[in-house]
Image (tube, rainbow, N blue to C red):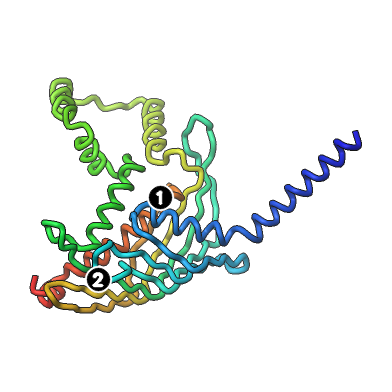
Amino acid sequence: MNKLAVLAFAVLLFLSSMMWYLANGSLNDYLKSQVILQSEYYSDQQVTLLSADFSNNTGTTSFNDFSLSNIEGLTQPQLFIINNISAQLAEVPTQQLYSPSMQKKTTTIVHIKEVRFDNLQAWSEEFKTTTSGETNIEIVLKKISMQLAKDYPALYPQISAELYAKLYPERSEKLALEDLNTKKIVQEIEINQAVLASNEAKYKKRLLGKAQTRIIITSVIIEQLTLTIIKNNKTITKHLQNVELGSFGGENGLASNQLGGELLKKILAKLINTEQTKAVKIETNI
């Protein structure tokens, strides 16, 4: 009996030590690892991040010296770098969202008031081996979009359908024909409230998936954006200030594992949009 008591005390002491470590020692390491893992997973490029530091007093996390490597074979080593990223939690940082699931569990939504990039420097360059003359930014953006569509097909139905058709080319024509043969010309309008509620729950379940933690970001801002474009034997640089990337997540939020891909996607899309403005095209003789 005494041996059991000693064992129980030892286990309790161990668990208490682990909880202290998780609360004080590993949160910053966890946040840093998530930024690196998600960025590398979606972009298929190497990522470095010097540090992550969460302040419990202010509810702010600071990420320092982020860099996304460039595609191999190009002149620049990095696709873009960011000196500092700060993420400020909202005054009410968490809430519970009911998500229909087999487990009948609720989903925790983490509300981030603002994500701010202090200084983002990017390099755009044509990838010579592509027949379409795509830039490094366009190639990486395509990779990210494809991976997001694979992981969250309900949110990217068009890309998901294209991926499905490529994977199963023999099925696409058959499925199209079946759809034409069986589709009703006039569809019935459902009015039963129970059926409507059930259909809405099923649709919501498809959108939310199995994620138990979701994230909403109210605002994303780049304070200083510098884009260097290397094209047609010319190098030009564009400077933008206070670039707003909008909000993320809507009312249901993004799956926590999805956030890295969506942020990268929005940043790269903004860089492409900047490069494709009329003034830049004239300067690069496109």
Q: Which amino acid type is marked by label 2? A: Thr
The kind of secondary structure element at disc 1 is loop
Q: Which quadrant holds residue 261? A: bottom left
**Mark 2 / mark 1, whichever is N-terminal:** 2
- Which residue lies under the disc numbered 2? 75
| Residue drawn at (59%, 67%) of the image | 55
Residues 199 and 164: in front is: 164
The residue sitting at 17% across, 67% down in the picture is 276
Query: x, y (%) of residue 213?
Result: 50, 47
Question: Pointer 2 and pointer 1: residues touching (CB < 8 Å)?
Answer: no
* Residue drawn at (35%, 77%) of the image: 224
> In the picture shown, does residue 220 fall above or below 228?
above
Find residue 223 and report its horizontal and vertical position in percent. Answer: 37, 75
Among the 4 quarters of the image, the one containing residue 174? top left
Residue positioned 15% across, 57% down in the render: 130
157 displayed left or right of 255: left
Q: Is residue 136 left or right of residue 7?
A: left
Residue at the extreme front: 73
Disc 1: which residue: 258
> Horizontal and vertical percent for residue 66?
42, 68
* Numbered label tally: 2
Towards the viewer: 8 or 199? 8
Task: Classify mark 2: helix, strand or loop.
Answer: loop
Residue 116 bears which disc, if any? none
Looking at the picture, does residue 261 appear above or below residue 62? above
Q: Quadrant of the C terminus?
A: bottom left
How crowded is the residue under tag 1: few (<14 C-alpha within 10 Å), some, or many (20+)? some
Q: Amino acid at mark 1?
A: Gln
Residue 24 placement, left or right of 11: left
Residue 4 image point, x, y percent = 85, 36
Mark 2 vs mark 1, CA separation in Å: 30 Å
Looking at the image, the residue that sits furthest to the top is 182
